[in-house]
Structure formats: structure tokens, C-alpha cells
Amino acid sequence: MGITHDVEQELEGLVATAHRIREAIESVIEGKGDAVRLTLTVLLAEGHLLIEDVPGVGKTMLAKALARSIDCPVRRVQFTPDLLPSDITGVSAFNQQSREFEFKPGPVFANIVVGDEINRASPKTQSALLECMEEHQVTVDGRTYHLDGPFMVIATQNPVEMEGTYPLPEAQRDRFTARIAMGYPEPAAELEMLDVHGASSPLDKLQPVATTAEVRALIDAVRAVYVSQAVKRYAVDLVTATRQSPDLRLGASPRATLHLVRAARAHAALAGRDYVIPDDLQDLAVPVLAHRLLPSMEAQGMRRRPEEVMADLLRRVPVPESREKGAGEAGPPR
Amino acid sequence: MRLPIAAGLATAAVSLTLYPLFHGGVWFWTGLGAIILVAAVSVLAARPGVPLWLAPPAQALVLSVYVTAVFAGEEAWAGLVPTKDSMIALAGLLGEGFTDIQRYAAPVPVNPGIALLTAGGVGLIAMLVDLLAVRLRRAALAGLPLLALFTVPAAVMSDPIGWPAFIIAALGYVGLLTADGRERVGQWGRAVLVRRARPAGPAGASGRSDTLPLSLAGKRIGFAAIALAIGIPALLPTLSPSPLFGFGVGSGTGGGGNTITIPNPIASLRGQLNQPDNATVLTYTNNDNVPRYMRMYSLDTFDGEQWTMSQPRGRPENRVALGPLPSPPGLSASIPVENVATSVRVSEDVEGLSFLPLPYPATSVQVEGDWRADESTLMVFSTRDTAGGQEYNVASQEPQPTFETLRDLPANPSEAVAERYLSIPDSLPRPIRATAATVVQGAESQYLQAVALQDWFTSEGGFTYSLQTQGNGVNALMEFLQNKTGYCEQFAAAMAVMARTLGIPARVAIGYTGGSLIEGSWQIRTHDLHAWPELYFEGAGWLRFEPTPAGGFGQATARVPDYSRAPISTDTPGGGATPSASAAPDTTAASQNPAMRDPRDPDAGLGFDPIVTDTGLPVPARIGIGLAVAALLALLPAAWRAATRRRRRHAWARVPASTGPGGPPGVPGGGAEDARAALDGERLGAAVEATWRELVDTLRDLGLGHDPSETPRALARRLTERHELDAETAAAVARIASAQERLRYARTPGRIGSLTGDMRRVEGTLRETVSRGRRLRATLLPSSTLLSLRAAGEKVLDGFDRLENLRIRRPGRAAPPEPPARRATDDRVLAGSRD
């Protein structure tokens, strides 16, 4: 009974904090509630976010707004074709005074790293982010430096059709928990934006509404969210469906399953629930899975995008009916 | 690959229907061997590079080797290769087989000759089917040789083929058609699709070929057709037992039919009497060496044209093997009877006779086979066996009434007898009635009228016997009465009709006269075939009369019964068995009589048989019963649905109060024993689950649908939004969905109150949102029940498919197009996860 109570309290705190962050972000970006919510979800799921859209729809603004509303170190890297890996991870420089090499940490040593236009950098530089994102550590000259949590990479990229871009390879896309598209704002929201942004940048007025410690606590609370055996099975069913779909050349990886369930926990917690329901998975399946899928030749021929295929699969995979009592039931919910 | 096997299976299935022709099962296995060989050759010949024309000669060769090896192995070279000797041996066997088939009535014993004929015939049919279905790709045409095989038992056997055999045969043919269709569609299907479609989701993850849905549809149509072919004749009350499929003896409708096997006994009469070859039909001996008429048929219906027989009714309990026959109708215990024991041997040459020639009235018959007695007429018949070659013993009790007794009998036939045996069509010409009235003028009792009629026909009327009379029917009857020339048929029919006009129940019997005594036994020949009237007198039962002139210028062996002669004539010499002469044995018989008849029928003493009223239910009543049964059947899904709903509501009754409404929060394990809490939790879970299922089923019934990918929450949202539910109902739906959601997915379900009220409310509101017709359908024909029925049916069909795939799928050919692509994808997935 005590546990339940604690979880409830934690959840209440979590929902309140999350609400503050959301409000702060939405004061900067109008009419993008879904994108903001998903950003928070990824943050709480200890994942990384890929924002993909045409230039000028507020990708960077979203990333910066999130970074600004949390009182934590934020670094921003503008990816360009001549950016080197060391420009991200940091370099060992020779200190003339101490007569030894000294590590100068790169921009990746922060809690939130905003990688702007990540697909404009060379693949070599892109891959430098890989280790940091997955393992939360940086290795330079044989020495490994750990990154503090929370650690989140928010990368923005232009659609691959744009000029001067190197498309992210599948392996790297797989590292991102979710991909969202901003989309053009509604006419009303755009009108309001003109008023707000006309005079000065609202970003400057944004005050942090949460501390790093608070965010860490939130992440811990999310880890405690319960995932029943049935829901786990449903996640596996969904992922398996992508692997078997004739419309897809490449299905989702096991890492995708892991990301999906983690994100679902955060999603449930943000809704004030201490357990995951299939609806969470359904809401997240497209942003979490779609960017990892490759359409088959036929699907490409029929101009079916992976997002559509995924949505179609969601309609076809049945929701688990029974209450399953699995082995993982009694253990820690992770 | 698939087609030759399907062709072989079809032939084997149809050959199964030959079962009633043989004793034992050896014939089937030899036939099956031939089929397997033919199919095997066909499979081999289907390999690429083998010329198309090669298969039939190869099959013929293999078949001949098979037949040689099995039936003439000793004469053949190395036991296999046909030689001149083996050919001769086979030819000899064939001849034997043909003779045996001519000689024996089915079921025949399987001797080598017959087995050879069967195996060869089945093998030839298999070759023909293979040629048509596999070589020429005309699977539908292959039905013709199969049909030919199927008609063999139908033509040979008088009784119907069992419906299970028909189902098997039909399944075989349907399987052949399905295989053909699948092969056809499969060819262009594969060519069009570059990559095989695989259904998403783990439920249908098994690999399926493109033609499967089509073949499934084909199979379903086939099954449905067979089920209808079997079911509809059985269900429709107006169809009398169809010629091919019977459901037991005499279960069809009565009243309308003619006869069972002989289409019209009276029509065959003259033909038999005219035959130049006067063959012996049967011989009999009896204990008092007196010739007796042997009756086979009793024609009880006169439709204005001719005398016909209503469908005899033989219930299983009326099998003659089970005991004495029903007691003779109308014969009271006061009439003395003579016990007669007769042993009869019917010639083997008699074909298709399914009625036993018996002296009337028989009390017991000892005969082999499934012979049954018609309750009212005491005809003994079989739908399975024939009388040819039979030897049987009959006990009969011949009534020995005296002229005086009969003369004084009152004229009061029971209503049932009167209704059945007194009906005359209104179209009967008046002169016949008038003639009858004139003839019997002055006769005081019915019996005397009958005697007067008989005398008129035999002597006073001036009739002559001639076989050169044409036709029957009313006009023929009139002609007969005017020309006064005819043979037994006209005499019997005329007397019976005239008796009916006088109010005497009458019918026409067909059988044989007593025959002639040759070497100590009575011989009955074809020319003794005879028709005579039987008249009914309450108390004496049915009595035979003989209006046909006897002797050299008439029916040679016809005899006028003694009781129909006036007492004066009993003194004339030659009446050996007059009542007075046999008075002594009669009295003893009479004293034994009641005791003998009592066991079966305590009413026998009253003088009539109550069973005679059993003419079956009238047709409207049958239709009514059929409709009622159909209605009950149609209501079954509704009843099932109602029972399910009750059970689901009841599930809440088992949930303890602590977790129910008003109780403390139902978090289990507060202070009570964990086991009990766990049990309570289980019950609560079951109840919530039941409510959820009820909701889903209700949606299905009302046509509102429920997608398996729809979560409880999404369902509640959809219902609330689409049907604009009021706040309270929306809350009820939400409560149900939330309970189910927590139960399924949460760590602990938390407090859940009884949802019965919520469910009722939701159901009521939802019902109002749909049309009245839909509501009615939801009650009477609930889709949820039909869906679950369909799911069960599909499981069965899936089982069939799985069986078929097991049998036919060959790893070498069917699988290859798929794996490479699949493997590449898998590799990529693995690579992705390794990085």
C-alpha cells in the first residue's frame, strides 16, 4: 500500500512539473502541443529526439525552448559540412604550463545537446555522436569520459531531398527514440506568432521552470511505471508486424522495441498513470518506429510512406485480450 | 503433383460407394492398389520432359502388371510380367467373375474372379479420371466416369446408398475440382505477384500461398453444396424418400406413393401371365398339404383409374425376426382358425422381389434378412434384401368361419377401415353402382352380397376368361362389365370396386394361386400369378374371394374359398376342407387362439386391430412440425446469446462484497489471508472480463463493430463521440473500459465496483441508437453468436487446410522463391542491431 501511495505522489509531482515545462515551451511555440508533448516524453524516456522538417518551422526553437525551460547546461552545435568529430566530443590539448595533455570537453558535455541540421555534417562527424548517444560516454585518446544524466540529443534535420545534405544512415537513425515533424502552423497560430515574435524573441524571456535534479527524479519515477506482460507482448507483436509486413524492406530493430516501451512508460507517466496501456504504444508507434523503417520497392512504387504503413499495421495487430501473468510480473519494473 | 493425387482420391472415394455390393473389404484394397498405381504413374508422368501422351499407355501397362501379379502371379514370369499362361488364367478368372455376378445377388462374396473384375474396373475408371482431369485438364468432365462408378450400386441395389457414402464420394469429386481450380489460379497467380504477401501480425504469421483464399472459398462452396444436397431432402416434408438416399425403411410419407420396388404390380401381371416360359417361382410344403394362395401385395387405393398400394410402413420393431407379426385386423377370437405351417423356397431366378409371398394371415415368419411387416396389411417386405433364393417358414392362422357365422355378421366396419377401404372417387360411372346393386338384390347381409357378387362373376354373369384384354382404368372396367371378358386383374378390380360401392371394405391382393402338387410339394409357376379381391367383415377380418373363373378356361389353379359357398354346396364331393369336415381341429385351434394372439395385442378379442388407424400424420401437420423445428433451430443462437448474457451477469454475484460496491477499497491482502484475496481477485477479474465481453458482443450484435486493435479506452471514446452519449452513459462506458484496462494492464486493478448496472445502461442506450430492424436482428440472430460459430467453422476448415498442406507441400518446389529475400532482410536487421 505504501508503494502505491508513493508512486501516486511521485506521479502527481511529475505531472505538475511536466505541465510547467510544457507551458513554458508552448509560450514560445504556438499550436504544437503534440510535438511538445512528444519532446517531453522522449526526455523522460532518456531518449534522443530527431526533429525533421523544412527550414523555418521552429525546429531549433523547440529544441532551444526545452533546453531553456530546464535549468541545466545546454550546448548547441551547428552541423556544417566541415565540422570535425573533435568539434563535438572535445580534444586533448597540450597544456604548456602543466606540460601535459589536457582534455577540453566538447559541446557534447552538457545535459541537452542541440544538434542543428545534423544531416549537413559529414558521416564521420555524424557518427561521432553515436557513442555519446547510446553509451552516454566519450572516448578521446583512449580515455573515456562519462556524461552526466540526463543526457538528451535533440537533432534537427532537413528532409533528405534538400540540397547539401548527407542522409543519416539507418544505424544512426535507430539511435533516436523518436522522430517528429513540426509541420506548418495553423493560420491562427501563425498570426499569433507574428504578434509575439514581432517585437522581441520570447525565448529571451523564458525562465527555467525545472532543475536538473527534478528532471532526474522524474526520470526515476518513469522507470517505476508498470508494464504488464500483455503490453510487452503487444509491443513485440507490433515490432514483429513491421518485420513481416510486405510493404517494408526493413523492419524495426529490437532496440526499437526497447525504445518503444521506454517511451510508453514516459507517455503513461505524463498522463498520470502508473501503468502502461496499449493506447500509449499506439500513440507512440508512428513517431518511435516509423523513422527506422524502410519501405519495400512496391510500397515505394505506390508512394506509401513508412508512417502510413505503420498506421496501417496498428489497425491490424490485435490488442492483447487476456490478462497474462508473466515471469517478470513480480520483479522490478524494468 | 496435386491434381493426380486428387484424381486418385476422388476415384477411391467414389469406389467406396460400391460397399453394399460385396461381403468384406478385400475388393476395396485391391481396387485401391490399382488407383494408387495409376496415380503414381500420373505423378511421374507429370515431370517436365515426359511427353503428354505417354501416361495412359504407361498406366494401362502398370495396371495389367498389377492385375497379373495379384491374380495370376504363379503363371506370370517372375510373378510380374504377363505371359500367355497368365493371360489365360486371367481370362478364366474374368469369366468366373462374370458368372458369379450373374448368379449371386448382392452382396456377393468376394472370390478372385469378382475381385479381379472390381480391381480392373476401378483401375480403368481411375485411368479415365486421370486422363480427363490431369492430361486434358477437364476436371469437371472427370465426374462422368466417377458418376458411372457411382451408379453401379445405385442400379444394382434396390435400396438406397447410405448418405455417408454419398458424402465421401461427393467430397472426393469436390476435392478434385478444388485441386484443379487451385492449379489453374495458382499458375497465373504466381506469375503476377513478384513477392508473396505475408499477413502482418503474429496471428496469421504462417506462410500461405496466394491461392489459399480462393481454394478456401471453393471448398466452402463445395461443402455447402454437399450439406444442402443431404440436408434439404431430409428436411423437406413433401419430398418422399428420394430414389438415391434413404433414411431407413418406411420413414417417408404415406398415402401418396405407389409401391416400393415394383412400379405397378398390376401392370406386370399380364406380362408375367403371358410369358411363354412358365418358370417355377417357388415351391412350398405345408402341414396339411392343402394349396393356399400366396399373397405378396395388397392394393388398398382405388384412384378411379387403377388399384395402387400406399407406401407400406415397416418400423424397426416390426422386423419379422423380432417375433410374431401384428395380429390380423378384424379377426375376432370367436372365429375358429386353423394353424398352418408352411415352408417356402423361392427360386434363385426371381429378381428384385422385395415382398415375400405368404399365406394370409401370417403370424410369424422365419426368414434371413431385414424383413418387416406392414402393420395393417401384414405384407412382409424389405428394402434391403430380396426374396430370390430365400427359404423361409411361415406360420399362419387361416380363419375357418362358417357360412352361417359370416352371414349373420353385422355391417359395422371401424371408421379407420371404412375411410381407407371404402373410398371411391366421385368420378366412378353410375352404371357400375347400378350393376352392383342389381346383382346383390335380395341379399340380406353384406356377406351374402359379397357371395352374390362372386357368384355373378364366376357363373351367373356369363363372364369368360381371356388374357387378350387391354388396359385398365375406369373405361377398361366399364368395357369389362359390358364385354364380360377379362382376366384375374379385371375380375378382382371389378369385384373390389363393386364391393366398395355396396359399403363392403375391399382391397385387391396380388400374389400367386396355390399352384399344383408335384412330387409332394406345391409348385407355383409364373402363370399362377394372380389377383383377387379381399373383403373385410368386422369380426372375421379380411376374407379372400375368387371372382375369376377357374379351371381349363380360366385361371387354372384358382379356387373358390369354401366359406363363400352356400351350405348346400358343402355337401358336394370335393370340399375336403369344409368347416364341418374339419370341425374337430378347428375347435382346438379356436380354444388356443386367444392365448396365441394375446401377447402382442390384448385388443385382438375385440375383433379389430387398432393399429390400422395409423395412417401417419397428415401432410400439413408434418409441414407444421418441420416449420416448428426449423423455427426452434433458428432461435438457437438467440437462446445461446441470452444464456451467455445471464451467465456473464451472474459472474458478479460471485464477487465478494468487499470488492463490490459500497465496500471498503478492494485492494487485496489487507489483513485477510492472501489466498482468499487472490481468489477474490480472480473472481473480480472474471466478472470484469465477462462484462467487457458482453459489451463487445453487444456492439457486434448491434452492428457497431469492434476492431481487435481497438483498446478499451479507444472503444469508450469512439462510442461516446460517435453516438453522442449522455454524460451518465459516457461515464458508464468509461467505467467499464477503465475497469477492463486496469485489470489487464495495471499492477493492481484497484477498486472496481459492480458494472452490471453500467452495462445495462450502456446496452439500453446503444440499442436506442440503431434502427428497429437492427435491434430485432440483434435479439433474434445475434451476430456475436454467429461469429463465434463461424470462427469454429473456420477452425475446422483451417484444420483441413493444414492436413492438405502436410500432404501436398513438397519442400523442394513450393518454398524456394521466398527465403533469399527474407534472409537478406533478416541480415540487415541483425546488422542494424549489432552496430
Image (cartoon, coloured by chain):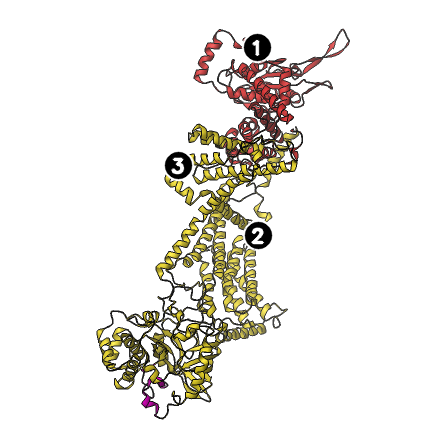
Distance Cα–Cα, label 3 vs label 2: 49 Å
Q: Which chain is red?
A: A
**Quadrant that contains the C terminus of chain B:** top right
| Residue B405 image-quadrant placement | bottom left
Query: Which type of secondary structure does the marked residue at label 1 adopt?
Result: loop
Residue drawn 34% across and 69% down?
B416
| Residue B538 image-quadrant placement | bottom left
Distance Cα–Cα, label 2 vs label 1: 73 Å
Q: Front-most of B500 and B223?
A: B500
Asked if the magenta segment contains residue B502, the reply would be no
Q: What span is in magenta? A: B545-572
Q: Is residue B482 above or below residue B816?
A: below
Foreground label between 2 and 1: 1
Q: What residue did someone put label 3 on? A: B770
Q: Label 1 is placed on what type of residue?
A: Gln
Mark nearer the N terminus (3 vs 2): 3
Visible residue check, residue B412:
yes
Q: Which chain is yellow?
A: B
Magenta region, mostly helix, strand or loop? loop
**Circle 3 chain:** B
Foreground label between 3 and 1: 3
Residue that sits furthest to the right in the current view = A99
Classify residue A333 as left or right of residue B383.
right
**Circle 2 chain:** B
Query: Which type of secondary structure does the marked residue at label 2 adopt?
Result: helix
Q: What residue did someone put label 2 on? A: B807
